[in-house]
Image (cartoon, rainbow, N blue to C red):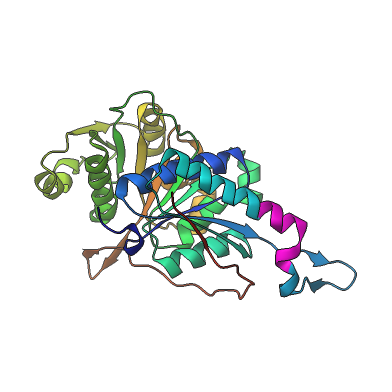
Amino acid sequence: MSDPTRKRPILTGFDGSETARGAVTWAAAEASRRDTRLLVARAYERPINVTDLSWTPVGLLERLPTYTHRDTAVRRLARDCLTTHPDLAVETTIRAGHPSDVLATLADETDAELVVLGAAEHGPIARLVLGSVAADMVHHVARPVIAVRRTEVADPQAPVLLGLAGVPEDGPAVEFAFDFAKTHNVPLHAVHASNNRAAQAGSLLAPWRERYAHVRVHIEVLPDKPAHALIEKSRTARLLIVGCHHHKALHRMLQGSVSHTSLYHAACPVAIIPTATQNGALQPARPGRRPVRQHARRARTSFKA
């Protein structure tokens, strides 16, 4: 068996909720299957003293009762993961800062292969005002982000569902979908929904079908709105995979996007895959960089059975 500590980790966030717990459980199973390590992170926003608006001194952070409670909870969760996956290498860390900032920084520092987060249920007004960590991560990290709402899969052969836009920028999402289907030994169901043009799905998938010859592929073209078609199909899928084409914020707010609509409404976990093009040629997305706030940080704790 290869050394999992030499591979890119799967990063997952935990905020104490049952939704986040389900996401960590999903991430642990995926890390075990990929023979890589799991990093469970928890963010902690330092309290402000309202009398003088000064930040809590860094040295006192670890002694706060709420910090200790969070540290204990994330360690217990790591041990629960080891109970189910005894050979899994698990690390935990707690860092001060907003969850999106903390996770984006850790994703860059560790060159995480995947970022896995819980997807809570929110109404449209709450999403507009509050947003979500998962939605923030889709636009702040140039790597796959998986949002987990429902983890149980009734059918062991439930397919991987791939949403196709029918454009060359679909490439990274197609690659991820074929690799995931191969890793899990399940079929791949590619869906292209279009009302106004003929689908190019078959020709687009041809190079990957040749490379992943053992993956069973079903291509379906539907005269429907893409988001609606994918949400309906997600009810029987293991994972929904869509590309993120980074539409402008105003367009997303007024019309939505397939990736964001899927993120909030799909019945199965959703993988949002970033795309990048250069000079018209398909290029894999590379880890991005963003300004990092300097926060107090705690050394990671490793667990191993």
Q: Nearer the viewer, residue 261 or 255?
A: 261
Is 44 displayed left or right of 152 in the figure?
right
Give the magenta part as a residue range.
61-70
What is the magenta segment's predominant secondary structure?
helix
**Image position of 265 with respect to 9: above or below:** above
State whether residue 105 appears in this view. Answer: yes
Tell me, yes or no, whether the highlighted magenta stretch contains residue 67. yes
Q: Nearer the viewer, residue 196 or 65?
A: 65
State whether residue 261 appears in this view. Answer: no
**Image position of 95 with respect to 242: above or below:** below
> Where residue 102 sits in the image (x, y, percent)?
56, 64
Q: Residue at x 43, y 34 (%)?
A: 268
Q: How many marks overall?
A: 0
Q: Residue at x 66, y 50 (%)?
A: 129
> Where residue 43 sits in the image (x, y, percent)?
61, 59
Q: Residue at x 77, y 63 (%)?
A: 47
Is 280 displayed left or right of 33 in the figure?
left
Residue sitting farthest toward the front: 305
> Where residue 132 sits in the image (x, y, percent)?
58, 50
Is 249 displayed left or right of 222 in the figure?
right
Residue sitting farthest toward the top: 154
Tell me, yes or no, whether the highlighted magenta stretch contains residue 19. no
> Where residue 61 sits in the image (x, y, percent)?
72, 67
Is 19 displayed left or right of 274 in the figure?
right
Q: Residue at x 30, y 36 (%)?
A: 160
* Image quadrant in which you'd find residue 3: bottom left
**Image position of 154 with respect to 4: above or below:** above
